[in-house]
Amino acid sequence: MAEQEEARGLWVFVEQRRGKPNRVAWELMGRGRQLADALQTQLVAVVLGHQVRHIAQEAITYGADLVYLVDAEVLAEYRTEPYARALTELIERHHPEIVLIGATNLGRDLAGSVATTLKTGLTADCTVLDVDVSQRLLLATRPAFNGKQMATILCKTRRPQMATVRPRVFELPKPDPARQGDIVEEAPSFGEEEIKAKLVEFIPATGTRIRLEDADIIVSGGRGMGGPENFRILEELAEVLGGTVGASRAAVDAGWMPRERQVGQTGTTVRPKIYFAVGISGAIQHLAGMQTSDVIVAINRDPNAPIFKVADYGIVGDLFEVVPALTKAFRQIFGNRKPTAAELVGALKAQTGAQDRGAAAGE
Amino acid sequence: MHAVVLIKQVPDTTEVRIDPKTNTMIRAGVPSILNPYDANAVEEAVRWRERLGGKVTVITMGPPQAKEALRKCLSFGADRAILLTDRAFAGADTLATSYALATTIQKIMETEPVDLVFCGRQAIDGDTGQVGPGVARRLGFEQLTYVIKVDEIDPEKGEIQVRRVVEDGIEVVRTKLPALLTVEKEINEVRYATMPDLLRAARQEIEVWTKDTIGADPNQCGLKGSPTVVSKSFVPSPPDRHLQLFEGDVAAQAAALAEKLSHLDVFAGRLG
């Protein structure tokens, strides 16, 4: 079919807010680079926003051969209509064969609108991506039924083949500042006067808790916690380790923890350096959201709990004894002290400083 | 104000089990429920009707037994229920589903205007969250996803203001009606239907519409209208890890585990 023959190039939509790219875009660039090479096609980054040329530069360091940049005031804040129209216009002009978008709230909001306008197939929330080189098909694999089943989905005749992909399923590639690529700037065909939605206010997330996606160490509690007040022992362990607290769906549905703390298929997919599953039996929907963690520790009363099958270390026992004992043991090892507030601020600054330097490196 | 709520009957995914012998999903005997997020969508629509007057119409696409889910919505206070059912709709992906639902809403709009469409953020069986945006696009309605609060609906001005969740905070967005909202669980507490509610719902008529009722193009319905196909499905297997346990009482086990973990790179600089 003509539609398939004309289409060339693997595109990654580079999500950004207020000039800061979302790391899922770079994760997709990493995997996208491999798939584009397999298909012997270009890896193209799409950057939409206002005053975001530095992100286009950065996309090249992450592997883009070509960047389409639409830099316009109407795109300063994400709103469905201008973003969907700008992306649709680019796709209709250049005919990519594959378009990948991070499965964030922004990405899912955008992808459904664009795929509908283009009348093409969209596979949502993928966790595995591959290609069939001979048929030039994207093999998009996603969990369904609460993570109990995986399905590989194809879009055979329509182009582009679109997919949203969960954050943290692909590794963050190392940027190469010496890499060369082209930036092609295009303009939207519409202006602010055509857009109905207005952003009245943005309220940044409050609280000092580290976001699950950003945490190196997560201590999660499940049904075994027995109630919201008992999460205090997990907070204490997380504090000693410099980590954050998560929860299983059961604990969230019971109202013990807020939804933003939920790890799993319907919550957040995480990939920390250490994941503690405390009083979590290990429903497949939970495993789907944490099983790529570097090290998994399971603490559960039931030696047959499925969580032990995916764990590297385990303690079978009463979590109300084990967790405080573990906190105490770590306190002893780390010199019986918590990091001071100044140290924490220093560590945080070092982290964000590194990100800022990375963002500025392309300029 | 006329609000349409799009709902889905789903298998209770917490009840779905895997057959360890065949490594396939056992769906038989799994109870069907109203998709939990959709219950919040109905609740929100009914609350705004209670404040502003008007009407709430609930629509589902599904097999005849999906009437049960519609009945539940009626017990929550919806005024009208439509079951869209036809073999032509079978096997629909998100594109074909949004076509059928948008066409149904357009059919309703031939006789009365629709100001708002409410959906749940996603269905718990498919988990795509893509049908809402698809319907909004097809109808040309403003799209407001992941809504945790509706601040204001101003029918005079034809405006709506909502709060929606994004990764790093909350956005307050104001736009024009008609609009389609997908809502989060946090938006409200779904009411319990009382006995009189249930009795009233049991007596209410559920309209049954087919593809001919809405004048749908068969090429855009069901399997035919779906650009995506499932090439294979399987039960995921966890990665290979070797579990290490520890000896001794709780304190000894905890100490041994802490010792092991303390040598990981993530703690570099914390030791000594």
Image: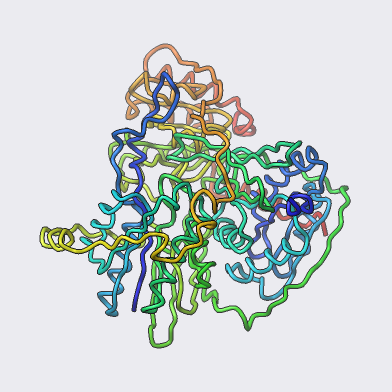
Question: On the image, which quarter does residue A216 sit in?
Answer: top right
The residue located at (64%, 51%) in the rendering is A162
Coordinates of residue A142 in the picture (x, y in percent): 54, 40
Coordinates of residue B252 in the picture (x, y in percent): 42, 16
Coordinates of residue B57 in the picture (x, y in percent): 31, 68
The residue located at (44%, 53%) in the rendering is B122
Q: Is residue A317 shown left or right of residue A55?
A: left
Question: On the image, which quarter does residue B240 sit in?
Answer: top right
Q: Is residue A220 shown left or right of residue A2?
A: left
Q: Does residue A47 show up?
A: yes
Judging depth in this view, the residue of A182 and A215 nearest the camera is: A182
Direction bottom: furthest residue? B156
Q: Is residue B91 shown left or right of residue B34?
A: right
Q: Does residue A357 show up?
A: no
Coordinates of residue A130 in the picture (x, y in percent): 67, 37
The residue located at (76%, 36%) in the rendering is A134
Direction top: furthest residue? B247
